[in-house]
Amino acid sequence: MSTVEESIEVKVPIRTAYDQWTQFETFPEFMDGVDEITQVTETRTHWKTSIAGVSREFDTEITEQLPDERVAWRSVDGVDQAGVVTFHRIEDATTRIMLQLDFDPDGILETVADKLGFVKARAKGDLERFKEFIEARGTETGAWRGEVDRPGP
C-alpha cells in the first residue's frame, strides 16, 4: 500500500468546506481524471475515471462521517483504496483540509507513477482546484450533514 498526504487552507468557513466536500457529484469539476460520480445511496458512490488512458469504474462507501470534522471511505470493488479527509478550523473564515489516501498501485505503470510522485502531485492539484472552486463560489452547492459511525473492531 502507498500513502499520500496533502493539505491546503481554504478561505471559507469550515461548514462551507465540509458541506461542499459531501457533494461528490461535483468532484469532476475539480478532480483531474474523474469523469463522473453518481451518488447511489447516502453512503455509496459509483466512480468513472480516466487516468493516463486507463478508464475505470468502481464503487466506494463512506465508512465514517462526522459533520465539519471528517469523511472516510474505502473502495468496495475494482481499485484498492481508502482515505480520509479532515477539516480543521483555522479562523472563522479559514479551514485547513487534510487528505490521506491509501492505495495499492495496479500494475507497473501505476507503481512507477506512484514512485515518481505523480499520485501525490495529482492529489495536491485536486486540492488546489477544490480551493479555487469553493473560494470562487463562496458557498457550497449543497450539503449532507448525516453521520456515519466508524465500524466496530
Image (cartoon, rainbow, N blue to C red):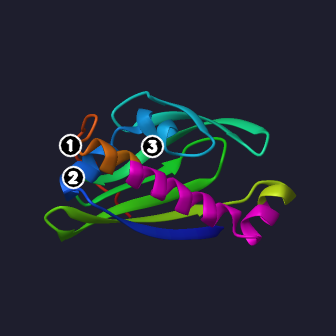
x, y (%) of residue 112? Answer: 81, 65
Q: Earlier in the sequence, mark 3 or mark 1?
A: 3
Tell me the kind of residue under disc 3: Glu
How far apart in space, not on screen, are marks 1 and 2 (Cα)? 6 Å
Q: Which residue is mark 2?
A: 67
Q: CA distance from mark 2 to mark 3?
A: 16 Å
Magenta span of residues:
111-132
* Residue 49 picture quarter: top right
Sequence-wise first label, 2 or 3: 3
**Mark 1 residue type:** Arg
Q: Quadrant of the N terminus?
A: bottom right
Could you give the CA–CA distance between mark 3 and mark 1, rounded to whole angstroms? 16 Å
Q: Which residue is mark 3?
A: 61
Q: Secondary structure at mark 3?
A: strand
The numbered mark at residue 68 is none
The answer to whether the residues at label 1 and label 2 have Cβ atoms under 8 Å apart is yes
Instruction: Rate crowding at label 3 as few (under 14), some (14 to 19) or many (20 or more) other CA atoms within 10 Å.
Output: some
On the picture, is 62 further left or further right than 142? right
Residue that badge 1 annotates: 145
Q: Nearer the viewer, residue 122 or 59?
A: 122
Residue drawn at point x = 55 percent, y = 58 percent: 125
Q: Relative to 123, say whether 138 is above or below.
A: above
Mark 1: secondary structure:
loop
- Residue in the image at 61% along x and 66% along y: 120
- The one nearer the camera, 39 or 136, is 136
Quarter of the view holding residue 56: top right
Question: Residue at coordinates 28% horizontally, 35% vertically from top-left?
Answer: 141
Residue 16: horizontal and vertical position, in percent?
22, 49
